[in-house]
Image (spheres, rainbow, N blue to C red):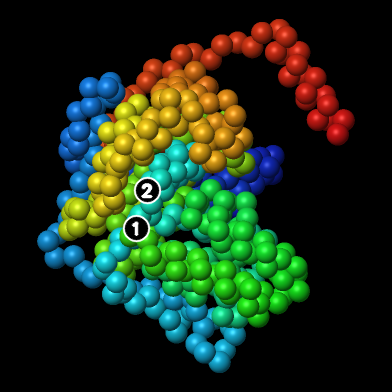
Amino acid sequence: MVISVGDESLCKISSIKRCFIILLASPLIVGVLFFMLKTQIQVDVFHGVVKNEDIRNDQSYDVERTTSIIEISSTSQEILPPERGLSDEGSNVVDEEKKVITPANNTETTAVILLTYMRSGSSLTGDILQKSPDTFYIFEPLRSADFANREKKTVRYINGSYLLHGQYDLQHVYEETLYGWLTCDLSRVHAQSFFDIGFLPYAHNFHDYLRCIRGAKYGNLMTRNALYESKQFMDCLKELEQTCKSSKVKIVKTIRTHGAIAQSIFKSIPNSKILHLIRDPRATMESKRHRNVCHEGMTLCIAEHCDRVRKDSLVLQNLKSSEPNRISTVFYEDIASNPIVTAKDMYSFIGTNFTEKIASYVYNITLGMDTTGCKVCVQRWQNGKKAKSSETHIAAWKSGLPGTYINQTQVLCKDIIKNYGYEFYMAPPALKPSKSQQMLGRRKKAIRRRV
């Protein structure tokens, strides 16, 4: 429809304000329609290519889980190696266009990416996997690069090269760091990853390294920018590298790796594997809301979470069609309700022995409500000091997540819930707040207005 300024039937002097509003609203309406169409196309694609296939019939859990397999052509194109992030010798600034990931040749060890999402049980799952003496485990090594990017800081490497903020792709830094840790080539790992003192202690194999750098007074070295010239630090790093190389299995637990990056690592490291951890999106949303991490609102938080799960699922199932033994899906609900069997299956997948000692530990920190030895379990952003049976977390979202958000999740994540075998739930109607709750709400609003 064309609106003419001279058309008195549409834009009379008395209704010019109405016309002005129509002109302003038209682009917004078109944008909303485009977003709805784009979202529907993504969901239709996911439905169109994914089939359900039973993966187990566990009598201990009342939801019959299904996984999905993507139908693809038998002639799939080889994925080209992505760009690297380290500079050539003689230059201290990284030129990302000059470097690409080259396939690793070491097939004697296994590299595992625990690919998952925030508030999906990844810390518990990673702690179970690191209990094997054959593993070298890294807990969220990309967090420091994420923070550096948010704070507009330079990303540095131990050889003295660096990436200025605004001149690098954060996803390339992620990929470079993952490749470095999984191949024990620490020159490829951004330097801040070696000093994430908040998260490194959750990996058992880093304890000796942390004691070493504390002895080297790492804090003062970083302040004086003398980190890369410190022989003490380099000695600590060499010991860590040797620990990594002597381990049979390298495992990275990460919530910041998208399927596309995992795919590139998968193609570059021949003996690599991907363990995809899935949790009911309604439970994930309940946990995120409880921890107050959805800063831009629940609706956007729900949509972004399920969009990422959807995209990652398609990528991984594409890979699984040609390499079925290198991709595996594990459900948090299975870990929580049947931890011994599920942990044994995970150990079999990564190629390590599942001993009675490990089985006892797994039972204790899940159903046994004994978190002794699990440092990450007792953190306040996990269970805290009040240990609970892991089974209590499975359906806690039914009482903890308001019905409005349950329904929103079931609409925006309908395909995820259906294709991963979760059951839809009829949320109870919202209860009217009591008089005391209404009064408390009014008081809070009054305080906010005064502030």
Q: Which of the labelled discs sits on residue 415, or is there none? A: none
Image quadrant where residue 273 sits:
bottom left
- Residue under label 1: 249
Specify the amino acid type for callout 2. Answer: Ser
Camera-side residue: 178 or 49? 178
Question: Tags 2 and 1 in contact by the CB under 8 Å rule?
Answer: yes
Specify the amino acid type for callout 1. Answer: Val
* Residue at image location 20% in from the left, 33% down from the top: 56
- Is residue 273 shown left or right of residue 91? left
- Residue under label 2: 132
Camera-side residue: 353 or 433? 353
* Residue at image location 27% in from the left, 22% down from the top: 60
Label 1 packing within 10 angstroms: few (<14), some (14-19), many (20+):
many
- Is residue 176 shown left or right of residue 331? right
Q: Residue furthest left?
A: 74
2 shown above or below 344 = below
The image shows residue 70 at horizontal and vertical percentages of 21, 49
330 shown above or below 64 = below
* Residue at image location 67% in from the left, 74% down from the top: 227
Image quadrant where residue 263 sits:
bottom left
> Does residue 78 appear in this view?
yes
Image quadrant where residue 291 sits:
top right
Count of numbered tags = 2
The image shows residue 285 at horizontal and vertical percentages of 49, 33
Q: Quadrant of the image for the C terminus? A: top right
Label 2 packing within 10 angstroms: few (<14), some (14-19), many (20+):
some
> Does residue 415 appear in this view?
no
Q: Residue furthest bottom?
A: 90
The image shows residue 126 at horizontal and vertical percentages of 43, 45
Camera-side residue: 442 or 359? 359
Helix, strand, or loop for circle 2?
loop
Helix, strand, or loop for circle 1?
strand
